[in-house]
Amino acid sequence: MSRSPTISFIGAGNMASAIIGGMLDSGFQAGDIWVSAPDDGHLQSIRKRFGVSVTTDNRYCAQQADIVVLAVKPQVMGDVCRDIAPVVQNTRPLMVSIAAGLTAGTLDTWLGGGLPLVRVMPNTPSLVGKGAAGLFANSQVKDDQRNAVQKVFESIGSALWVDDENLLHSVTALSGSGPAYFFLMLEALESAATEAGIESETARALAIQTMAGAAEMAARSEDDPGQLKRNVMSPGGTTERAINTFEEGGLRDLVKKAYSAAFERSREMSRELADKQ
Ligand SMILES: NC(=O)C1=CN([C@@H]2O[C@H](COP(=O)(O)OP(=O)(O)OC[C@H]3O[C@@H](n4cnc5c(N)ncnc54)[C@H](O)[C@@H]3O)[C@@H](O)[C@H]2O)C=CC1
Ligand SMILES: O=C(O)[C@@H]1CCC=N1
């Protein structure tokens, strides 16, 4: 693929929008991108927002592409794959699935077998070029295809390959679902501060800047997060009180439980969805 690849997205929702928005910001061309979905608000909004080509015909969309990104909910993936299978068996693009839980083996069966397929677990901060994605390639994927998909996901954040597909359950529980964990923390902080009397806009701005600043420091610092935390905790001061409150309230156990719940749900989905569709 020496020219820019044509990339088709099947599905026009949150994650497709985040990836496309990030790609366009980093220099990919709207003219190289196709999107298909039922004629709903998603499809129209993606067309208006990004100027990409859209269609309600998944087969036509898939036919345009060197890379087909499957960006529908796992529950409808079986129908979508079986519908486009005759087309992609003929054109043989690189297939990329971003669905949680669905294994490369299940997808390959639905797509008629033998196609190069990469599973990616991305996340929504891809929209602002700060995504974190885990990638797994099946044995049909050639080096140039691996490089092409890496280029897409590196253009919107970091892209790390895993050799064992099972590790994608962990990636899902960590960085796939992870943005929501931090948004929850923002919500909770904002509401605590608002109840204590700060205007909600001010509270939100301070909380967001604090989270962004802490993340940037953790990324740049040679100290581990524990040390960075201790640097804020003046003995007998305010942070110490708050951190003790978190520890006594069992925050670490709660985080472990939430992580395991997401991990187990990812495994459960791979079994359930393979049987059902
Ligand atoms: N939202 C997130 O943070 C992440 C989502 N994912 C995965 O991305 C995939 C999409 O998730 P979201 O974007 O959040 O869902 P969404 O519900 O926002 O988008 C799904 C899209 O699929 C379209 N669609 C429904 N039926 C279709 C069909 N038969 N043919 C073509 N398009 C169809 C809908 O119109 C919609 O545009 C899921 O498989 C999910 O597991 C992966 C990582 C993160
Ligand atoms: O909640 C979900 O199932 C998807 C996968 C990771 C983030 N959203």
Image (spheres, rainbow, N blue to C red):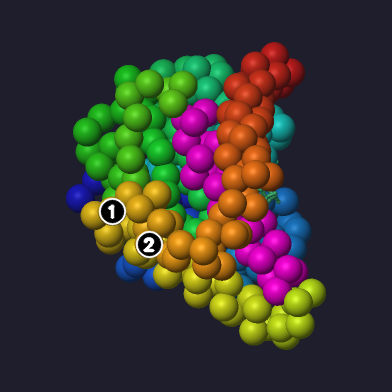
**In this figure, which residue is indicated by the disc labeled 2?**
231
**Kind of residue at disc 1:** Asp
- Position of 181 with respect to 210 (left or right) is right
Q: Secondary structure at mark 1?
A: loop
**Rendered location of residue 235, percent (x, y):** 46, 62
Q: Are marks 2 and 1 in contact (CB under 8 Å)?
A: yes
**Residue 91 sits in which quadrant?**
top left
Magenta stretch in the rendered image: 168-193
Residue at (74, 69) in percent of width and height: 191
Cα–Cα gap, marks 2 and 1: 10 Å
Q: Residue at x 66, y 66 (%)?
A: 189
- Identify which residue is drawn at 60% across, 59% down: 242
Q: Nearer the viewer, residue 79 or 90?
A: 79
Dot 2: within a 10 Å radius of its alpha carbon, few (fewer than 14), some, or many (20 or more) residues? Answer: few
Expressed as whole percent of the image width and height from the top left, the position of residue 90 reads 44, 29
State whether residue 130 appears in this view: no
Q: Determine if residue 139 is in view.
A: yes
Q: Quadrant of residue 228?
A: bottom left
Residue 100 colored in magenta in the image: no
